Image: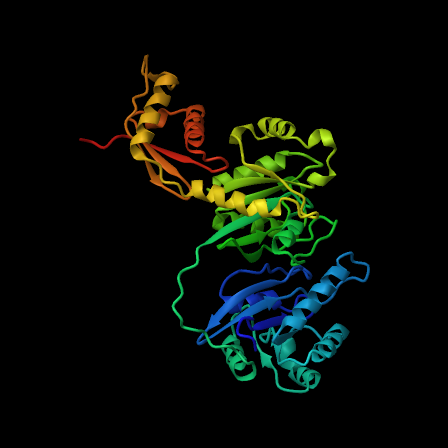
């Protein structure tokens, strides 16, 4: 085995046998979406698993059952074939609480044609059906299998031990390596704006399923990319629709997973369909990102489909000034994911935003600038009983980076208006070039002398 190639173990089986639950159990984290509805997983998930002295890649696949006229059939079949050809070992999972099906038989026959090591697993061993039908599974596999309960964690230790005995697992190297700093980047947007096409363009191959049908992507998929010596983790997500339009439980789960990616991202690429322009939902997504302290870069996709009068910076700056006026000049790029236009510029834009996201400002110059802002545009007079008075300002200091946070001392901390808070944030943003970056200011009374 080539030491450069990771050892791939792929979990396979028909829909709803517990593949994603097993994947999460082995990783000890909720990585893949899990629900009672079959067919929830579409794109495959891949994650590195370190167990004892071994390191390998674990892959969770969607269930091998697609309706014949499903427009995703061809794309998913090609994806399956690529995964299986690359796999070093397979885990074949059956459902221990329902009878075996013709699909189980067809799938097992197909998997045996790949001639790579395969473990047989029956999930949901804690059911009455399994207890009464153990012999059926023995006859089906023609050899021993491992009964487990992925949900409860039963039999997982035996499964890992079987990995060691039956698979050719590579041992973990203990060479000292310098810590690699990765930049987590979430790709968000409304359904069918081209997020998965963008991911494929960034990677240079068809990693994510792409379809004109909205809602193709469901899981949040992590993808590692190196560019110019920098390491990125791009997270492809499901399209985000207005809450009032979400009716299915599957879409609700996918939406929650997409929003949760903001908690581990430093930058969001908000993909906008140039042929549709900005919507209230785009505004909501920017707001969600800033609430979670994540920088935002706009990617105006499908640029190649626009008429010439809409292919100007002036036109789009006017659109942003109107629709995104509360966010003060978000950085943007014109791209075409399908034509792969300006894709390399995305990496450069992320790195540039990241520099300012991590910026430490000069304390003395910040105090000088703050004094000028508050003198030139003072805060509105505040009420003090029957009287009105000026706000008293103390020191300003940066107290955090990534994202930038500031503290301002004032005895009138509770009376600072929302509009003046926005004014100060915009001044800081303009002064230090923090475009697209959320800023927080904590107003505190000065310490008691």
Quadrant location of the N terminus in the rendered image: bottom right
Looking at the picture, does residue 306 appear above or below residue 30? above
Determine which quarter of the picture holds residue 109.
Answer: bottom right
Colouring method of the image: rainbow
Q: Nearer the viewer, residue 351 or 138?
A: 351
Of the 4 image quadrants, the one containing the C terminus is top left
Give x and y (percent) for residue 112: 70, 80
Q: Residue furthest front?
A: 228
Seen from the viewer's position, the closer of residues 135 and 81 is 81
How many labels were placed on the picture? 0
Furthest-right residue in this view: 69
265 over 435 or under it: above or below: below
The answer to whether residue 349 is above or below residue 217 is above
Report whether 69 appears left or right of 291. Answer: right
The correct choice, above or below, for 86 with respect to 168 in the image is: above
Q: Position of residue 344 (x, y in %)?
A: 59, 48
The residue lying furthest to the left in this view is: 449
Q: x, y percentage for residue 120? A: 63, 79
- Residue at 58 percent across and 54 percent down: it is 220
In depth, the one of 265 and 442 nearer the eye is 265
Is any atom of residue 294 visible in this view?
A: no
Residue 185 rendering spot, x and y as whole percentages: 53, 49
Residue 78: in sight, yes or no?
yes
């Amino acid at each position: 085995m080539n030491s450069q190639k990771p050892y791939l173990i792929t979990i396979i089986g028909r829909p709803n046998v517990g593949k994603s639950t097993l994947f999460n159990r082995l990783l000890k984290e909720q990585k893949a979406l899990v629900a009672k509805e079959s067919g929830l997983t579409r794109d495959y998930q891949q994650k590195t698993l370190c167990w004892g002295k071994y390191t390998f890649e674990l892959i969770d696949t969607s269930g091998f059952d697609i309706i014949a006229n499903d427009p995703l059939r061809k794309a998913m079949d090609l994806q399956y074939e690529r995964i299986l050809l690359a796999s070093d070992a397979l885990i074949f999972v059956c459902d221990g609480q329902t009878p075996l099906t013709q699909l189980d038989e067809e799938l097992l026959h197909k998997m045996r044609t790949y001639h790579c090591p395969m473990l047989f697993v029956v999930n949901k061993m804690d059911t009455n059906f399994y207890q009464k039908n153990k012999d059926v599974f023995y006859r089906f596999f023609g050899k021993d299998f491992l009964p487990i309960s992925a949900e409860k964690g039963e039999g997982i230790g035996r499964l890992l031990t079987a990995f060691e005995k039956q698979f050719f697992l590579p041992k973990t190297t203990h060479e000292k390596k310098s810590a690699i700093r990765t930049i987590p980047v979430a790709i968000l947007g409304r359904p069918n704006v081209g997020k998965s096409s963008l991911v494929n363009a960034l990677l240079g191959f068809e990693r994510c399923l792409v379809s004109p049908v909205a809602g193709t992507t469901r899981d949040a998929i992590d993808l590692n990319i190196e560019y110019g010596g920098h390491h990125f983790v791009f997270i492809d997500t499901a399209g985000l629709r207005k809450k009032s339009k979400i009716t299915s439980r599957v879409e609700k789960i996918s939406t929650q997973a997409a929003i949760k990616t903001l908690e581990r991202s430093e930058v969001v690429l908000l993909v906008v369909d140039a042929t549709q322009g900005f919507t209230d939902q785009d505004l909501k997504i920017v707001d969600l990102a800033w609430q979670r302290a994540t920088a935002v870069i706009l990617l105006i996709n499908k640029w190649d489909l626009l008429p010439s009068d809409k292919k100007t910076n002036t036109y789009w700056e006017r659109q942003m000034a109107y629709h995104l006026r509360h966010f003060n000049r978000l950085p943007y790029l014109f791209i075409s994911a399908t034509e792969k236009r300006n894709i390399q510029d995305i990496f450069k834009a992320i790195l540039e935003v990241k520099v300012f996201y991590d910026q430490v400002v000069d304390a003395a110059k910040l105090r000088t600038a703050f004094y000028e802002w508050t003198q030139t545009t003072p805060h509105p007079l505040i009420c003090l009983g029957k009287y009105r008075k000026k706000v008293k300002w103390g020191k300003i200091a940066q107290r955090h980076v990534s994202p930038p946070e500031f503290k301002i001392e004032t005895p009138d901390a509770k009376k600072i208006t929302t509009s003046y808070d926005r004014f100060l944030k915009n001044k800081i943003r303009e002064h230090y070039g923090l475009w697209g970056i959320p800023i927080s200011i904590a107003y505190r009374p000065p310490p008691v002398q």
